[in-house]
Image (cartoon, helix red, strand yellow):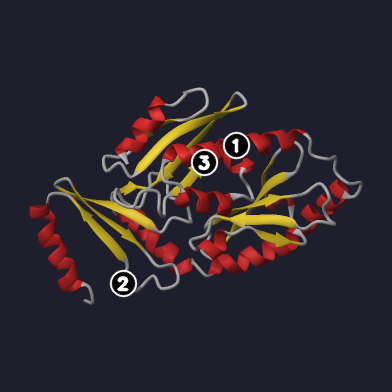
Amino acid sequence: MKYAIIQIILMDAKNFPLLVPSDVDELSYCGFITVKGQELAFQIKLENNNAGLKNAKLYGSPKLKRLIFGHEKALQQRLEQCASFSEFFVDLKDLLELLMTKEKVDPSPGENYYSTLINELNSIGWDKLEAFNPSLKNLSLKLNDSSGRQHSIFVSLPFSYPQTPLIVHAELPTPSSTTSNHMTSLKDAVSFYSKELEKFQYVWSMLDDIDAHTWVLEPCKPKRSDLMRRIALGNHCSLQIELDASYPKGECQYRLFGTESLISPLREKIIKNWNN
């Protein structure tokens, strides 16, 4: 993986990102990619140092997320297929250039576009409108779950709406829940995701408890889709866990970091006390 980083640094800085490790284990990398004169920040997280880009995750700035909205699944698959960072960034840059060009030539909205949108917002309540872009083509809605947690759902409206369905997604803890869904109305989207949020109440309560009562090293700012936590244990040791959203009380994946002489007793305690 260090070889891949050297490759990136040696590439043309005007066309490819500056990429630097953001953690001591070199499992997280931050950087930016320049497309049509615009710098777009991003982050890539690796599963481990030996798996290459397999199961790597791509995160982006709000602007990058808006551009790739609806293309997340294809990009994620491409990231895992690429042999190196440089190979992936060539594809990412090509896609972003295409999307930026397409943004400028999008057709005008249909005659019922704005009136339909206004009626939809009246129906669900304007208090649910969290943010929107100037063209009203992309907006986010805020929903509260039964525990009072606030969530955002992201909506992309084609200018042919309502003839063409909305594309909606939210940051939830399972792959199927983060997949973009086609909805016929904002009311349908609010109804669907209000039910989806209730599926994760227990796992979110567990994660909130961890965040409140331990020193969480990673993620720095956990999203509701993040099931992983790396927790400081002292003596330069840490514990990484990842809960199962469908069975949060079950045995979770875990990994200990630190000097073997220090983490070996901890590993034995975990094994001994797992079912207690």
Amino acid type shown at disc 3: Gly
Residue at the image position 36 percent from the left and 42 percent from the top: 28
Circle 2 crowding by C-alpha within 10 Å: few under 14, some 14–19, many from 20:
few
Quarter of the view holding residue 27? top left
Question: Disc 2 or disc 3, which is closer to the eye?
Answer: 3
List the residue tagged with mark 3.
Answer: 60
Could one spot residue 21 in this view of the protein?
no
Could one spot residue 131 in this view of the protein?
yes
Residue at the image position 70 percent from the left and 55 percent from the top: 167
View extreme (right): residue: 111
List the residue tagged with mark 2.
Answer: 251
Q: Measured along the vertical axis of the image, is residue 219 above or below residue 209?
A: above
| Disc nearer the start of the sequence (1/3) | 3
Q: Is residue 113 left or right of residue 184?
A: right
List the residue tagged with mark 1.
Answer: 94
What's the distance in space between the residues labelled 1 and 3, CA to CA?
16 Å
Amino acid type shown at disc 2: Glu
| Disc nearer the start of the sequence (2/3) | 3
Quarter of the view holding residue 97? top right
Q: Measured along the vertical axis of the image, is residue 264 above or below residue 271?
A: above
- Local SS, label 3: strand
Amino acid type shown at disc 1: Asp
